Image (spheres, grey):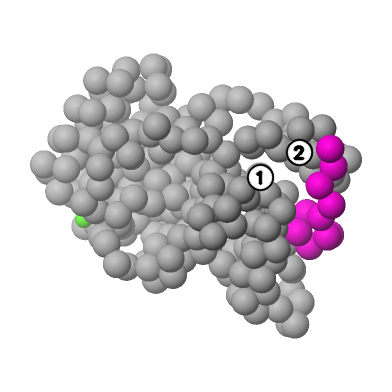
Amino acid sequence: MNGNRILIVEDEPAMLRGLKDTFTAKGCEVLTAADGESGLKLALSAQPDLILLDIMLPKVNGYEICRAVRQQGLDMPIVMLTAKGQEEDIVLGLNLGADDYVAKPFKVRELVARVNAFLRRRKSGQDGVTRFGEFVLDLTAHKLFRGGREVELTAKEFRLLAHFAAHPGRALARNDILNAVWGNSVMVTPRSIDRCVTTLRAKIEVDPHNPIYLQTIRDVGYRFEVETET
Ligand code: CA
């Protein structure tokens, strides 16, 4: 994490201080803001490598910050710090451009691991190929291979998997997936995604009922995990 610049926007002093200490100790340059207005200013002017963003903030809330940052064309990862059991808020934040979330109270180790993964991916370039486990997804050839042998996918399954592979580690809301993969077709519902995920899992997961790669986020959507966490 050394040398990465992280912005933390959080109005609860103890939480802000704790997070600042944690990421400073990991070698990050840490910028902090205790309200949304100064947080947004810093996000736009300092262009951090990643933003940890509380949602309920004085002056300007986290949603407005997400929206404003993306409107400015900035694409750094945004990880929301949310309250537990607020799935609608989480989905709204994801729709507005956040990449992921952790629900308070969270384990610091888990947050650090997530942040680390986002920063590492940001540094590694894209070559049109995504590897996960023994799989290679070749976006140019439109093919999925397992240990060198092709795995047959339907066109829908491929597009869905390619969408997941383009957003590794991100929490993806159902309606965002729907728009990205199915477009404006009126014939599909969120259930269409669930069905496609089910058939995809049968092809790539060792145990489709206990998936490693295509993880369900209850009441929100899905997350594609390519890295095994410790
Ligand atoms: Ca707050």
Residue 54 x, y percent position in the rendering: 29, 51
Label 1 vs label 2: CA separation?
19 Å
Category of crowding for the residue at label 2, using alpha-carbon neighbours closer than 10 angstroms: few (below 14), some (14–19), many (at least 20): some
Tell me if I can see residue 74 in this picture.
no
Q: Which residues are magenta?
A: 149-158
Residue 141 x, y percent position in the rendering: 88, 40
Residue at image position (32%, 68%) is: 86
Q: Which of label 1 and label 2 is nearer to you?
A: 2
On-image quarter of the N terminus: top left
Residue 18 x, y percent position in the rendering: 16, 35
**Looking at this rendering, what residue extends furthest in the bottom direction?**
187
The amino acid marked with disc number 2 is Arg
Tell which of 153 and 129 is nearer to you. Answer: 153
Q: Is residue 123 magenta?
A: no
Which numbered marker is on residue 187?
none
- Answer with left or right where residue 176 lies relative to residue 27: right
Q: Is residue 146 above or below residue 5?
A: below
The amino acid marked with disc number 1 is Ala
Q: Secondary structure at mark 2?
A: strand
Residue occupied by mark 1: 166
**Looking at this rendering, what residue extends furthest in the front direction?**
207
| Mark nearer the N terminus (1 vs 2) | 2
Q: Are marks 1 and 2 in contact (CB under 8 Å)?
A: no
Residue occupied by mark 2: 146
Category of crowding for the residue at label 1, using alpha-carbon neighbours closer than 10 angstroms: few (below 14), some (14–19), many (at least 20): some
On-image quarter of the C terminus: top left
